[in-house]
């Protein structure tokens, strides 16, 4: 694993003074183009207390290593202005927890100057100030340098340099693909949600399953139909300070996982939503899940991504059907293109609305290149002529011997497949075989089974 270093430069620190929250921005992209310190929004947050507490939760996730906790670097949250909402996102230092706060139109009353994405400075004094915001306190929010309330730090510049490990960057790509495969499994209202979350085991490392039981949820120690995996109860810790504001809790998960699987936990708050997405196990980050690899292995995905990317305008909801019509592509190819764009941090996924949204992670583009070594290795095998297709199977020659691949079911005789059985995406041999099959027999050979080669 390699690290890149990202430099943040803020005109001044973010501050909360006399009810005015000025969030300093550092480099990013807007509809108007690249900007050193973009200005997106100025106005009143109509629900000050839950907004402050939830923003603090997003910052806490960025600061935390849930697996083997130890002091380390924190990354500043990312904010995207989509016109009718502000989305604050962060990723835990361990790469296993994704957090997002959506401040919706009902919680915002002000002026939007531009749409786009940037980092925002969340420092120690600001965190302390956010923790003190009360229910009746006014809160004026400015996202952008012009709204800073700094009067005593004239010209003060804040610079930060933090490592961005490849696994952390890849996590942003993986999590949106994994979330898109989840469905709503349960919903609890008001006090039912509060009682459930407060009843969870206090042991942070506890691994369990949560299953619907009438209008409530029950906790079990093994999977069952409709159950959702909750590995590492302590990873839900940032939900607890928000319980006094909760209107509902929604729980999302994949269909019939049968084993450890990712889950998502969404609190509806007044005028906003706070969402946590957890990796399948507390020691697993999202970067190794391999959810993006099947789409990235298609020949047309990269070219399609160029077309689709030009049609994105920081919409809060990306309509795939509309994109398909405008791009002249099938919805399947648009979805693969969105996955490709996700590897560059250009799209996220909103479970509540079951839709992608456009954002541009404010990191240097070279930081997000070549972040899928399995796919790189697969292409090398394909280019070296190491793959032989025979009906619906393939033989892949490697330094470790010949691997037998099932093209339809994605099975392989390599140790990776035997260890994970496809639960962490296809191995490099399956990817290589499918790349060659697409080239020699056409896309349908992979999608619907390979016809016998003549």
Image (spheres, grey):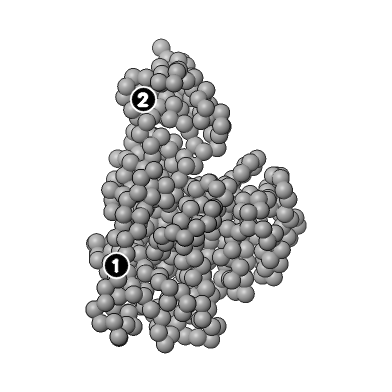
What numbered label is drawn on residue 159? Answer: 1
Residue lying at 42% horizontally and 87% vertically, measured from the top left: 18
In terms of depth relative to the viewer, which is nearer, 30 or 68? Answer: 68
Quadrant, the C terminus: top left
Quadrant, the N terminus: top left
Position above or below: 428 against 142? above
x, y percentage for residue 329?
36, 42
Seen from this angle, which residue lies furthest front?
70
Which quadrant of the structure image shows residue 244?
A: bottom right
Q: Which residue is mark 2?
A: 381
User: What is the secondary structure assignment of the residue under circle 1?
Assistant: strand
**Residue mark closest to the camera, 1 vs 2:** 1
Residue lying at 28% horizontally and 54% vertically, measured from the top left: 364
Q: Is residue 310 left or right of residue 378?
A: left
Which quadrant of the structure image shows residue 255?
A: top right
Residue lying at 63% horizontally and 41% vertically, measured from the top left: 259
Seen from this angle, which residue lies furthest top?
454
x, y percentage for residue 132?
51, 81
Which quadrant of the structure image shows residue 189?
A: bottom right
x, y percentage for residue 431?
42, 30
Badge 1 density bin: few <14, some 14–19, many ≥20, Cα 10 Å: some
Instruction: Determine the CA span between mark 1 and mark 2.
Output: 43 Å
| Mark sitting earlier along the chain (1/2) | 1
x, y percentage for residue 119?
35, 64
Residue lying at 58% horizontally and 71% vertically, measured from the top left: 242
């Amino acid at each position: 694993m390699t690290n890149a270093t990202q430099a943040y430069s803020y005109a001044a620190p973010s501050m909360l003074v006399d009810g005015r929250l000025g969030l300093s921005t550092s480099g990013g992209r807007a509809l108007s183009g690249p900007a050193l310190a973009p200005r997106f929004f100025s106005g009143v947050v109509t629900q000050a207390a839950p907004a402050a507490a939830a923003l603090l939760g997003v910052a806490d996730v960025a600061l935390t290593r849930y697996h083997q906790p130890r002091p380390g670097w924190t990354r500043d949250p990312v904010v995207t202005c989509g016109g009718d909402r502000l989305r604050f996102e962060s990723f835990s230092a361990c790469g296993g927890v994704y957090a997002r706060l959506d401040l919706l139109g009902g919680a915002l009353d002000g002026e939007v100057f531009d749409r786009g994405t940037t980092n925002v400075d969340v420092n120690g004094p600001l965190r302390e100030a956010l923790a003190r915001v009360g229910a009746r306190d006014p809160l004026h929010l400015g996202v952008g340098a012009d709204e800073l309330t700094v009067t005593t730090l004239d010209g003060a510049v804040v610079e930060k340099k933090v490592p961005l490990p490849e696994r952390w960057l890849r996590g942003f790509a993986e999590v949106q693909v994994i979330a898109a495969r989840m469905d709503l499994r349960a919903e609890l209202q008001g006090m039912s949600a509060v009682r459930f979350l407060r009843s969870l085991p206090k042991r942070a490392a506890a691994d369990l399953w949560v299953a619907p039981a009438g209008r409530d949820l029950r906790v079990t120690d093994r999977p069952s139909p409709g159950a959702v995996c909750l590995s590492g109860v302590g990873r839900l810790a940032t939900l607890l300070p928000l319980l006094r504001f909760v209107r509902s809790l929604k729980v999302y998960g994949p269909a019939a996982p049968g084993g450890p699987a990712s889950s998502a936990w969404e609190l509806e708050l007044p005028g906003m939503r706070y969402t946590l997405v957890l990796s399948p196990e507390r020691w697993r980050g999202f970067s190794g899940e391999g959810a993006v690899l099947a789409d990235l292995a298609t020949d047309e995905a990269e070219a399609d991504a160029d077309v689709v990317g030009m049609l994105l305008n920081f919409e809060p909801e990306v309509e795939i059907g509309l994109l398909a019509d405008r791009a002249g592509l099938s919805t399947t190819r648009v979805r693969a293109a969105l996955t490709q764009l996700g590897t560059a941090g250009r799209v996220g996924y909103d479970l509540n609305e079951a839709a992608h949204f456009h954002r541009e992670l404010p990191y240097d583009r070279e930081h997000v290149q070549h972040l899928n070594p399995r796919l790189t290795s697969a292409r090398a095998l394909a280019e070296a002529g190491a793959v032989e297709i025979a009906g619906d199977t393939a033989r892949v020659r490697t330094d470790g011997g010949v691997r037998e691949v099932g093209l339809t079911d994605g099975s392989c005789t390599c140790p990776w497949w035997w260890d994970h059985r496809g639960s962490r995406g296809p191995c490099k041999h399956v990817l290589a075989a499918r790349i060659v099959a697409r080239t020699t027999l056409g896309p349908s050979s992979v999608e619907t089974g390979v016809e016998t080669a003549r």
